[in-house]
Amino acid sequence: MQRAQEEAKRSIERARSEIERAAREKLEAEIKAEQERQRQREEEIRRIEREAREKLAGEVRAAEEQKLPEKQLELQRLEEELRSRKSERGSRRILGALKLR
């Protein structure tokens, strides 16, 4: 009888060990699967961010290219205005010098 009880205890212990091992393996598999899903989500986020940066850079370039002629015209207008003001100042100096005489 004692032998049967010891055998039953060992059988129960083996079953408990097997259940614990199976539970541990299942948990490890779930952790690995979650880590893989997390890695894929992070990869997807990086891809979306990269695409957004590339798209934004393209839009900025396009906007700058569209504004380039406008900026060149503005620059020419400002240069002409500067030349005009310089010539006005030169004329004023000459007129001022003539008045002093």
Image (cartoon, grey):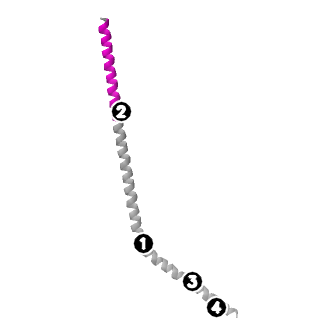
Q: For numbered disc 4, what is the local secondary structure? A: helix
Side (left or right) of 84 relative to 56: right
Of pointers 2 and 4, the one earlier in the residue sequence? 2
Percent x, y of residue 44: 35, 49
Q: Are discs 4 and 3 less than 8 Å apart at CB?
A: no
Distance from the alpha carbon under mark 1 to that under mark 4: 41 Å
- Tell me if label 1 and label 4 are in contact, CB under 8 Å: no
Q: Residue at x 36, y 35 (%)?
A: 31
Report the residue marked by disc 4. Answer: 95
3 and 2 marks in contact (CB < 8 Å) = no
Residue receiving disc 1 = 67
* Of 32 and 95, the residue lying toward us: 32
Q: Position of residue 101 (x, y in %)?
A: 70, 94
Residue 43 belongs to the span the image colors magenta: no
- Distance of mark 1 from mark 3, alpha carbons? 26 Å
In this rendering, the label closer to the viewer, 1 or 3: 1
Asked which secondary structure carries label 2, the reply is helix
Q: Amino acid at mark 2?
A: Glu
Q: Which residue is mark 2?
A: 28
Q: Residues within 10 Å of mark 1 (few under 14, many from 20)?
A: few
Task: Return the residue nearer the eye: 17 or 88.
Answer: 17
Mark 3 lies on a secondary structure that is: helix
Residue lying at 30% horizontally and 12% vertically, measured from the top left: 8
- Residue shown at 37% from the left, 44% from the top: 39
Extreme-bottom residue of the structure: 101
Crowding at label 4, few (<14), some or many (≥20) Cα neighbours within 10 Å?
few
| Camera-nearest residue between 90 and 16 | 16
Residue type at mark 4 is Leu
Mark 1 and mark 4 lie on one chain; the one further toward the N terminus is 1
CB of mark 1 within 8 Å of CB of mark 2?
A: no
